[in-house]
Amino acid sequence: RLIELFTKTSKSFREVCCQLTGYRIDGLQNNQYRLTPNLADNPSQDNLLFRLEEGGELSMLDTPFSNQITDLLELHLRRQNSIPVFLAAVIMDLFSRQTFDTFQESQSETAPSGDPHTAVGASGTIGKDK
């Protein structure tokens, strides 16, 4: 009964953490943790790997996904030394890409045909280029 309650509580906690942070966090062997962004294009490969060292600090290990986001890694981990800011930046980057792709698709579906000089202004209104 106690194990069942713990399993239910830990599952609920993992789901809430995932919703709050945008990452699914899996504990692996050797004090390693795999973080998979909810917005990952390929969840089985797009993940980050961290190891909890003996002194309590976290170190990030190389993954194919981390090698694709080297500018974020350089700025937020190496220069600013902040794992939380780095993780937030990764989520923002993935969100921006998906939002931009969705926006581009919706614009191409609803774009007026005909005049090639028609443009969408910052206010979202459609007008002639000047």
Image (tube, rainbow, N blue to C red):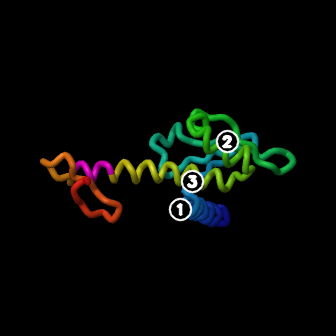
Q: Is residue 57 left or right of residue 65?
A: right
Q: Is residue 83 left or right of residue 92?
A: right
Residue closest to the eye, 71 or 28: 71
> Could you say which quadrant of the image residue 50 lies in?
top right
Q: CA distance from mark 1 to mark 2?
A: 26 Å
Q: Are marks 1 and 2 in contact (CB under 8 Å)?
A: no
Residue closest to the eye, 11 or 125: 125
Residue holding disc 1:
19
- Asked whether 64 falls inside the magenta stretch, the response is no
For disc 1, the neighbor class at 10 Å (few under 14, some 14 to 19, many from 20) is few
Residue holding disc 2:
74
Q: Does the magenta stretch mainly form a helix, a strand or a loop?
A: helix
Q: Residue furthest right?
A: 55
Residue 55, image x and y in percent? 87, 48
Instruction: Specify whether residue 4 is in view.
Output: no
Residue at horizontal 58%, vertical 40%? 69
Residue 128, image x and y in percent? 22, 56
Label at residue 23: 3
Residue at horizontal 32%, vertical 49%? 104
Q: Quadrant of the C terminus?
A: bottom left
Query: Residue type at mark 3?
Result: Tyr
Residue 99, image x and y in percent? 40, 53
Query: Residue type at mark 2?
Result: Glu
Q: CA distance from mark 2 to mark 3?
A: 20 Å
Element class at badge 2? helix
Residue at horizontal 54%, vertical 49%? 37
- The span picked out in magenta is 104-109
Residue closest to the eye, 71 or 56: 71
Element class at badge 1? helix
Residue at horizontal 56%, vertical 36%? 68
For disc 2, the neighbor class at 10 Å (few under 14, some 14 to 19, many from 20) is few
